[in-house]
Amino acid sequence: MSVSPLPARKSPRTDSDARKPLQKGQQTKAAIVDAALGLATQIGLEGLSIGALAEVMQMSKSGVFAHFGSREELQISVVREYHTRFEDEVFYPAMSAPRGLPRLRTLFDNWMKRTSVEIDSGCIYISGAVEFDDRPGPVRDALASSVNTWLSAMRRAVELSIAQGHLRPDTDAAQMAFEVHALILALHYEARFLRSPDSLRRAVQAFEGIVSRYSQPEPQANPAARQRKTPMSAA
């Protein structure tokens, strides 16, 4: 699972003196992106500006601009950083869970944990979709690529659940992933906008309902076999 392809990395320089300013520059850029992400979760990607960020970082506008070259590139850097953190918190920890429904449940549980935090801080995927849904361009492309990458991972988890026999073989993986995504969107609306106190509980309940509908039915014991059991065999 990865965000949209990044530019090819340059080969590291071997001169140690030349590396020092590069490392410092990378650290400064990372700090700027971190601050920009914090701002974007509160005011949206469109609210970001070189001037506002320079003020937060106590840097000159030209100093901030030198690291990105444009406001658009700054916004894309924020989207990529958000996606990286999303992967680190939601996707990668779930890979240690067994394939199939246990992994799918873990992905959802991790997603819920992150969502419960974002009820206060905001979600770049959701706010960004509102801001850029009708605005074609590189920022929208970066957002859409990140979201599609994550939804593809969810579909893959559903497909593995089918292959492991945890879900019915006729399960539509794309449909199930769509339903799970839909309830997360509903959770954000209910919790963040309407301030519904029981929204998290309802989201968990809704997920269990989705899983139940697509799960393989439990094998039924043969009634005749049960009748043939003696007290000794049942012990």
Image (cartoon, rainbow, N blue to C red):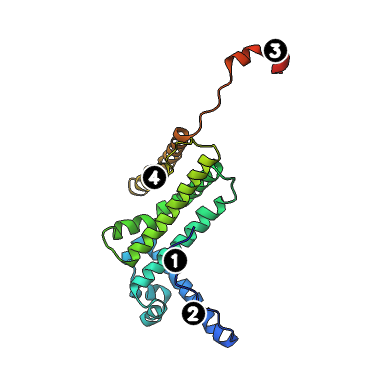
Task: Write down the residue under mark 4.
Answer: 178
Depth-wise, is mark 3 or mark 2 nearer the camera? 3
Q: In the image, what residue occupies the spot 40% across and 64% down? A: 79
Q: Amino acid under label 4?
A: Phe
Looking at the image, tell me whether mark 3 or mark 4 is earlier in sequence order: 4
Corner quadrant of residue 11: bottom right
Above or below — where is 203 with respect to 93?
Answer: above
Q: Amino acid under label 1?
A: Pro
Horizontal side of residue 27 vs 203, given as left or right:
right
Disc 3 to disc 2, how far (Cα)?
A: 78 Å
Disc 1 to disc 3, how far (Cα)?
A: 65 Å
Where residue 179 appears, x then y in whole percent?
A: 39, 42
Where residue 21 appears, x then y in whole percent?
A: 52, 84
Counting every numbered tag in the picture gives: 4
Q: In the image, what residue occupies the spot 45% across and 47% down? A: 155
Looking at the image, tell me whether mark 1 or mark 3 is earlier in sequence order: 1
Above or below — where is 38 with respect to 59?
Answer: above
Disc 4 to disc 1, how far (Cα)?
A: 24 Å
Which disc number belongs to residue 25?
Answer: 2
Corner quadrant of residue 43: bottom left
Q: Amino acid under label 3?
A: Thr
Q: In the image, what residue occupies the spot 27% across and 62% down? A: 135
Which residue is farthest right? Answer: 232
Depth-wise, is mark 2 or mark 1 nearer the camera? 1
Q: In the image, what residue occupies the spot 50% across and 37% down? A: 167
